[in-house]
Image (spheres, grey):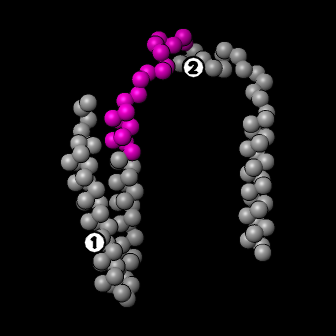
Amino acid sequence: MNLMITLLTNFMLATLLVIIAFWLPQLNVYSEKTSPYECGFDPMGSARLPFSMKFFLVAITFLLFDLEIALLLPLPWASQTTNLSTMLTMALLLILLLAASLAYEWTQKGLEWTE
């Protein structure tokens, strides 16, 4: 019962804050607030440069592989368990998944920088 009350309270509070944020307009919008700031000087060029989609995809791939490698960090503590064969099987499956996904990205040319 306490869990339901807590979840309901959190949901209602979050909903209320979202509604208030959408209803309150920004009253003082003027050009100085929306212009880019470069140490007090006028901008030399456009602040809206085109973004490389290939860079974005390589960055997301890096984050995914980094997250998968972070899953390997608890292995030294897991090796102290009584069921060592299960731990080694899970570690091997995780490493095989990481290697297979790297091989897939490599064959699909997802790691190449040139466009």
Q: Nearer the viewer, residue 80 or 58?
A: 58
Q: Tag 2 or tag 1, which sits nearer the N-term?
A: 2
Instruction: Tell which of 99 and 107 is nearer to you.
Output: 107
Which amino acid type is marked by label 2? Tyr
Q: Quadrant of residue 114?
A: top left
Q: Position of residue 25 (x, y in %)?
A: 77, 29
Is the residue 75 above or below the residue 48 in the image?
below
Residue at which label 2 appears:
37
Which range of residues does the magenta coloring cover?
A: 41-60
Could you give the CA–CA distance between mark 1 and mark 2, rounded to whole angstroms?
A: 51 Å
Dot 1 falls on a residue whose secondary structure is: helix
Question: Which picture quadrant has residue 50?
Answer: top left
Residue 32 is situated, as x and y percent measured from the top left of the image, at 66, 16
Q: Residues within 10 Å of mark 1 (few under 14, many from 20)?
A: few
Q: Secondary structure at mark 2?
A: loop
Q: Height in image: 79 above or below 60?
A: below
Q: Residue at x 36, y 72 (%)?
A: 75
Furthest toward the left, the residue is 107
Crowding at dot 2, Cα within 10 Å, few <14 / some 14-19 / many 20+, comes out as few
> As drawn, is 19 to the left or to the right of 107?
right
Instruction: Give yes or no for residue 18 being in the magenta stretch.
Output: no
Residue 16 is situated, as x and y percent measured from the top left of the image, at 79, 48
Q: Position of residue 23 (x, y in %)?
A: 79, 35
Residue pictured at 37% horizontal, 33% vertical: 53
Q: Quadrant of residue 84?
A: bottom left
Residue extending furthest bottom? 82
